[in-house]
Image (spheres, rainbow, N blue to C red):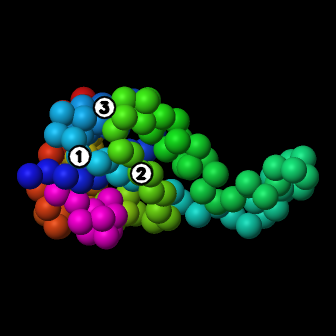
Amino acid sequence: MIEKIVVGTDGSDTAAQAVIQAGDLAEKLGASLVIVSAFDPVSSARLEKERADAPQDVEWSINEREDVDAMLSQISAPLEERNIDVKISARQGNPADAILDVAEEEGADLIVVGNKGMAGARRFLLGSVPNKISHHAPCSVLIVRTT
């Protein structure tokens, strides 16, 4: 039985299709959903400048995860309104590694990812998130056609 689903997103329209399908599946199965996004580190200089330019009462909220946290909160809100048990996770680093790590930590029964970037010779040269996940996942994987 599928009780916990992990879905990866980068905030793009194609990744949103995977999140929508994962949400629909979680709702139908009564499963919980963990939405994962990876982010690149932000330079200290940029963070310091943004904090200096921000009003004093909000400068504490400016951090290296600020953008990805906001994106994940926006994506999860409509799912939470449908009474789906949703958790968000922002991880620094490689997207495939972030999704795989969260799936293992959470004891996921299913990982859902979009297929974007999986077609053609490019996947053999650069690798891709769905390709890596399909080969290294600790559970079943659903690759959603998003393109």
Question: Which residue is under mark 3?
Answer: 20
Q: Is residue 103 magenta?
A: yes
Frontmost residue, 34 versus 65 = 34
Task: Give the dominant element type of the magenta stretch: helix, strand or loop.
Answer: helix
Rounded to the nearest whole Å, what is the CA distance between mark 3 and mark 1? 14 Å
From which residue to which does the magenta span run?
A: 99-110
Query: Residue 87 got which mark?
Result: 2
User: Callout 1, which amino acid?
Assistant: Ala
Query: Residue 31 got which mark?
Result: 1
Q: Provide residue 128's location: percent of width, then percent of height.
A: 26, 54
User: Callout 2, which amino acid?
Assistant: Lys
User: Callout 3, which amino acid?
Assistant: Ile
Q: Provide residue 16's location: percent of width, then percent of height.
A: 36, 33
Secondary structure of residue under mark 3: helix
Q: Earlier in the sequence, mark 2 or mark 1?
A: 1
Badge 1 density bin: few <14, some 14–19, many ≥20, Cα 10 Å: many
Secondary structure of residue under mark 1: loop
Q: Provide residue 47's location: percent of width, then percent of height.
A: 76, 59
Residue name at image x 82 percent, y 62 percent: 48
Whether residue 60 sits left or right of residue 118 in the image: it is right
Residue 23 in the image: above or below residue 57:
above
Residue name at image x 22 percent, y 60 percent: 108
Rounded to the nearest whole Å, what is the CA distance between mark 2 and mark 1? 12 Å
Whether residue 113 sits left or right of residue 83 in the image: it is left
Front of the two marks 3 and 1 = 1
